[in-house]
């Protein structure tokens, strides 16, 4: 078979066909140009930021954009760098809230300007400075801005004096949307934004987890061998209602020494026992809101926190140093102030308006628990009306439960105040309600009254707190009982006669041991001899002059035994709590 060839005809399109093809080409080109236009428009649009997060006051992530796409978002490498971040939806924050800008700098000298604004053109500007490389959170009040829409950061200064230790952490923290390669200029100074967040009111300074939080209210200066810290205009932008829910929190480290705190003109001393210590001051214990709050410490004491912030819950009694009770402003409308002991949170602290109010809550209970002739008996008002209760009180959970359980069994009509006390004790877990019965929970109650002068409040407070330790710390209780049991009958003689005169139930060795330790540690150890041989002895002799010679003989022969007990108690208090006889608190 021969080769078969198929001829190839050259086809030339007619004019009509040529025109249709040209239109198709134009259509395709137009579509491509339009697509390119959309791509260009999209590339110029603000892009949602994921390099760092912005959170609302509930911790939910907020969507926001930044127009910059040609660099690592949130990284500033030179003076003049500027970025603006726009919330997709403006947000209105609660009263007193601030915006917290967490940044990290590799430069030892950094300054930037922060602008915050709304949609209506209202804006706030503040300058922030970073003295040393590290992580800082600037907490800026924003009460002037009704609904936040944007913030802008502009670098004013970025020193070439850098800390190489921060460069790697900055690189690790950067993660912009495009996953672009990191600039080689990271070996030069840079400032990085880590997080934006709306936070509750914060005024002052706090160092935690290597991050320094600071607000514009804070000021610090060296004064010779002391450092002075100030929170200026601490309540600006806060309502009076919110101000009463605030607290001052202080954390100290380093050498033992006094921190002197000034609430306006009110001076308070706090004994820092070394290592680490902290305490809070509820703002509602004072009757005024000062223009500034100040603290002074020795330069070898480090202040890691000195700030004002709200309590997480106003329903819970605050945990405070009991010494603060003496500084409470006069109670007018409220019958008492309630708190917890910060060293033993299971102990409730009551500060009553006066003795009469305190009696309405606790007098019947005192007779039921301790008073000779009434122990275990729920007395009628008429039976104890003319009898003295106590100027200060202390009760353990077991005795509180016994009192209210006995009242329930007897269907005894308690006063409104006693019912209020019962419900408070249940709420705070000191007693438990099980059907119609009341059982002991955990803890104790102590109280003093504002009717006592300040010096006596300190003495009574120490006395009652020692009882609370006896009730709640088994180590201390075991030591006390052991010391009491080792005393001979002759060494116990004065204790028994004095407590009998005080109408205590001297048949209870538990009660006698408890009262002994309270009388031993309620004053400084150097004052013990005079207090027993003069003050207590003279009280007993006044009613029982026939005991004068016996009392004198006792003090000469056996007071040393009580002094020895006190020294052992003092050793325990110091090692376990940093306390000493006469001062079972740190604030004075």
Image: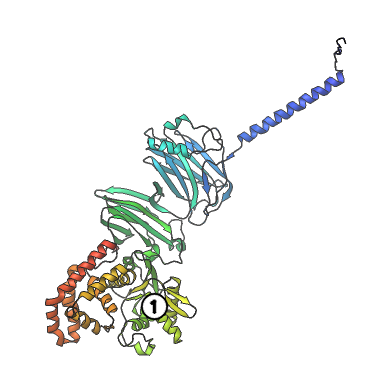
| Residue highlighted by disc 1 | 400
Q: What residue sits 33% from the left and 85% below the top?
A: 375
Q: What residue sits 27% from the left and 55% below the top?
A: 274
Considering only vertical position in the picture, is 312 above or below 26? below
Q: Image quarter for residue 543?
A: bottom left
Q: What residue sits 52% from the left and 45% below the top?
A: 53
Q: Quadrant of the C terminus?
A: bottom left
Q: Is residue 378 left or right of residue 99?
A: left
Considering only vertical position in the picture, is 442 above or below 187? below
Residue 546 rendering spot, x and y as whole percentages: 15, 88
Residue 396 rendering spot, x and y as whole percentages: 36, 75
Q: What residue sits 50% from the left and 41% below the top?
A: 152
Farthest top residue in view: 2
Residue 208 rendering spot, x and y as whole percentages: 39, 50
Other-residue count near label 1 (Cα within 10 Å), few / some / many at <14 / 14–19 / ≥20: many
In-front residue for pair 107/240: 107
Farthest front residue in view: 1
- Report whether residue 195 is seen: yes
- Report whether residue 454 is seen: no
């Amino acid at each position: 078979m021969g080769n078969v060839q198929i001829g190839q005809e050259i086809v030339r399109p007619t004019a009509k066909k040529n025109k249709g093809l040209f239109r198709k080409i134009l259509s395709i080109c137009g579509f491509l140009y339009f697509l390119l236009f959309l791509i260009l428009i999209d590339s110029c649009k603000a892009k949602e930021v994921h390099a760092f997060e912005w959170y609302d006051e509930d911790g939910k992530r907020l969507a926001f954009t930044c127009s910059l796409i040609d660099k690592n978002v949130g990284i500033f490498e030179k003076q003049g760098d500027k970025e603006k971040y726009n919330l997709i939806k403006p947000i209105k924050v609660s009263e007193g809230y601030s915006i917290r800008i967490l940044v990290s700098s590799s430069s030892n000298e950094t300054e930037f300007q922060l602008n915050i604004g709304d949609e209506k053109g209202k804006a706030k500007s503040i300058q922030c400075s970073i003295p040393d490389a590290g992580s800082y959170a600037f907490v800026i009040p924003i009460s002037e801005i009704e609904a936040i829409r944007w913030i802008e950061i502009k670098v004013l200064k970025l020193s070439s004096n850098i800390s190489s230790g921060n460069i790697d952490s900055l690189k690790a923290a950067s993660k912009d949307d495009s996953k672009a390669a990191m600039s080689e200029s990271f070996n030069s100074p840079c400032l990085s934004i880590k997080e934006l967040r709306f936070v509750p009111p914060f005024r002052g300074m706090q160092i935690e987890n290597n991050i320094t939080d600071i607000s514009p209210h804070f000021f610090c200066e060296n004064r010779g061998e002391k450092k002075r810290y100030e929170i200026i205009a601490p309540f600006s932008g806060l309502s009076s209602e919110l101000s009463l829910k605030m607290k001052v929190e202080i954390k100290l480290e380093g050498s033992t020494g006094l921190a002197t705190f000034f609430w306006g003109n009110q001076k308070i001393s706090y004994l820092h026992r070394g290592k680490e210590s902290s305490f809070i001051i509820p703002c509602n214990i004072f009757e005024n809101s000062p223009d500034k709050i100040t603290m002074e410490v020795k330069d070898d004491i480090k202040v890691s926190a000195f700030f004002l912030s709200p309590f997480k819950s106003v329903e819970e009694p605050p945990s405070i140093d009991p010494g603060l009770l003496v500084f409470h402003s006069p109670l007018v409308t409220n019958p008492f102030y309630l708190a917890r002991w910060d060293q033993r949170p299971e102990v409730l602290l009551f500060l009553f308006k006066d003795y009469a109010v305190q009696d309405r809550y606790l007098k019947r209970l005192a007779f039921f628990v301790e008073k000779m002739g009434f122990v275990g008996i729920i007395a009628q008002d008429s039976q104890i009306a003319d009898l003295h209760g106590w100027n200060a009180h202390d009760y353990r959970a077991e005795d509180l439960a016994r009192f209210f359980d006995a009242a329930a069994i007897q269907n005894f009509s308690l006063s409104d105040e006693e019912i209020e006390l019962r419900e408070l004790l249940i709420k705070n877990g000191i007693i438990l309600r099980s059907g119609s019965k009341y059982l002991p929970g955990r803890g104790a109650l102590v109280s003093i009254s504002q009717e006592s002068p300040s010096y006596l409040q300190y003495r009574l407070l120490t006395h009652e707190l020692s009882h609370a330790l006896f009730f709640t710390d088994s180590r201390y209780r075991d030591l006390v009982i052991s010391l009491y049991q080792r005393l001979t009958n002759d060494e116990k003689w004065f204790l028994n006669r004095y407590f009998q005169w005080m109408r205590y139930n001297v048949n209870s060795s538990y009660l006698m041991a408890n009262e002994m330790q309270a009388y031993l540690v309620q004053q400084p150890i150097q004052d013990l001899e005079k207090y027993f041989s003069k003050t207590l002895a003279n009280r007993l002799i006044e009613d029982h002059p026939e005991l004068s010679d016996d009392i004198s003989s006792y003090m000469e022969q056996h007071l040393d035994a009580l002094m020895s007990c006190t020294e052992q108690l003092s050793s325990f208090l110091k090692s376990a709590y940093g306390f000493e006889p006469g001062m079972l608190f740190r604030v004075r």
